[in-house]
Amino acid sequence: MKKISKMPTKEKETFKRPDGRKLAEIRKMYAKVGIIPNADGSAIFAFGDTVAIAAVYGPRQLHPQHMQDPATGILRVNYDLLSFSVYERKKPGPNRRSQEISKVTEWALSPVLDLKEFPNTVIDVQVYILQADAGTRTAGINAASLALAHAGIPMRSLVCSVSVGKLDKNLVVDLNKEEEDYEEGEGATDFPVAKIANTEKYTLLQLDGKIQPETVKKVLDLADKACDEIYEVQKKALKEVVEQ
Amino acid sequence: MKNHINEAYEATDTLNDESSAKKRKIVVPGEIIATGEDYLPSEGARREKENVLANRFGLAEESGRVVKVIAITGAFIPRKNNVIIGRVTQVTFNGWIIDIDSAYQAFLPIDESPRFISKSEMNQFLDIGDVIVAKIWSINARGIDLSLKGKGLGKLEKGFVFRIIPNRVPRVIGREGSMITLIKEKAGCNITVGQNGWIWVSGPSSDEEIKARKIIEFIADKVHVSGLTELVEEWFEKNK
Amino acid sequence: MSSMDCSNITKETIKRMFAEGKRFDSRGLFDFRPIEVSFNVSNKAEGSARVKIGKTEVVAGVKMEIGEPYPDSLDKGNLTVSGDLLPLASPRFEAGPPKFNAVELLRLVDRVIRHSGILDFKKLVITPGEKVWTVIIDIYPINDDGNIIDAASIAAVAALKKTMVPALDENGRIDYHKESKTPLQIEKDILPVTLTFFKLGDSLALDLAREEEEACDARVVFGISKLGDEYFINSCQKGEEVPLTKKEIDQIMGIISEKFEKLNEKLKKFF
């Protein structure tokens, strides 16, 4: 599976990413709020070719009653890919991957929410991927964060998410699909991260690949900088909704 | 970036001071609104060390030392004494269950009808699908209790109801009801605005009713416009 | 958005307004709201489209898969129309397996495409009797402000019109990284659509916004297409409980070709 490269590993400065981006460069981002009129809050967020849309309905009544929490409202996230968002068609309906991502997205977002003033209710967040080119869960979290804010839900801060990682020994930000499949040297390590904006608190940490413990801190530093950029994009999208 | 600050006068707000003393801007969750020990964070805001931060997306307002963030989007959060418009979904043995378009169900006890209703005439008075203007007189763990006792409350006959985003209700009502009075006059319709964003219109003909709805939606869509009264007068001129 | 059901007085008012030929947005009873069609919703789909009718928005995407033909049609490829009413699009849609209204929508779109002849199934054969293409259209409403059936059929047809057949590698398997040069063979001149007629009181109307739909008594969806100068009704389904009278059906048949033309005029500029 892993190809041992015969050549010595290239210097970091001369490493070329498949799409020509610099190591810490995020793909072109796009964010817009209020795209689904029926929803209480909604947003679209894209990293390059990865496009996620999110809609928030709530606080609203939660059925069945036994799932209600008398102390607080509950956040419920449903994430999935649209069938034609990927080359190999995905059959409609949840699968194990979408269930896992739904749950980690919920965990990524709930720390910023204060739902105590809505006991016995649910805040439903629906996240769908229209087009997938890696980083779908991170785009989804960014869209969901915007949609929750747009819905007027009490929130301490926005949540920003990005995939950082490694291609062979090169630390990179925002891997695309081609990079996720990278096989040279140490291969690709994909490290999706989410944090509460303007804090040192991480609410999503997942990892697949090979990375030395001492490199983790460097990669998180890259994530911090990337999240600062993402926060600016999110902020701008929210402020623009009011200008219409 | 242009930012026309609107003059949102909350009909239920007890603050009556002139807007010139208030500073307003759109903020996102976690954004610093003001810095200084003197400021007092109020609704929608919090203090973190020397900064006052936004606890939601909305319009941050500084009036004097008090800093709060008003919601400009989002679902209706019921408060005691709100006047709302709701639809009957069920007739029970001692009252009616009312959908008020919020996370919580509302209940109108038979004792809170405007006049005495016996248990056998409950359906005749209010049946499934009927709409009422009611006041929220109690909010507790069980839910929301409504009352029809009071001026302007009761069953709505004729006309129709439609919804706008609840946060836009203050500007449709206007300062001391000035905007809604203007609309009623110009459109020639009876109009009742519920705090939950539901609005009732009843007019002498379809044309007037259509006009009334259009102008209300025109106002509700504009979040940030000053000189709204002039715009409304202009609209009625154009759409005679 | 509210999930509050239509109230009695609103229904009576809309009924009265329809009887006067009036609507809240000042449209005629058979006028469509502004329509927008755009493409390339997903670059991973073989073809995809997004349709907006007023605030209603529906997306559709086409994927093509290689499979075996059905035993009773060895010389033909296949078509499947799939998708779901995403909870994203309306407070009334729930997560979970598709409910009846999702199933019905997909079946209605399937029938109009299948019977219009826009797709020649015989041209979907790769190796006769062994390997054929299955065309899979997935339809998803993104915002339901009424008339999602008609929006869905337009989106499905629009996606088909832009579909490129995937290139195959030397082993006859799909190679997505090879550029596809073959557009899906479809009849260029046929644009099948559905027209959903709603009945309220004694009035009929087209393209209802959600609040109008909720006030209605009955509806009937017709799939209609045109070949040369002739119009064909390809499918039909009546829904809801109130019956439709013969007079109403005659009235619909009297205007359906004209309404089909009007809709086509609006759509032509996007294709």
Image (tube, coloured by chain):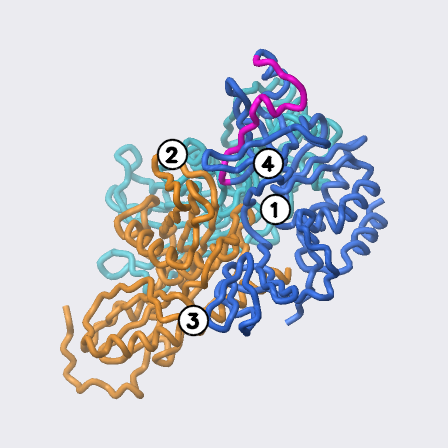
* Colour cyan maps to chain: C
Same chain? Circles 4 and 1: yes
Badge 3 or badge 2: first in the primary sequence:
2
- Image depth: mark 3 or mark 4 in front: 4
To which chain does the residue with label 4 belong?
A: B
Magenta segment: B103-119
Q: Is residue B103 left or right of residue C213?
A: left
**Amino acid found under the numbered disc labelled 1:** Pro
Examine the image and state in which quarter residue A5 appears.
Answer: bottom left
Q: Which residue is mark 2?
A: A65
Q: Which residue is mark 3?
A: A198
Q: Colour of chain A?
A: orange
In which quadrant of the rendered image does the C terminus of chain B lie?
Answer: top right
Is C60 within the magenta?
no
Q: How far is disc 1 from disc 3 in space, using C-alphas? A: 31 Å
Q: Which residue is mark 1?
A: B166
Pointer 1 and pointer 3: residues touching (CB < 8 Å)?
Answer: no
Mark on residue C36?
none
Is B116 within the magenta?
yes
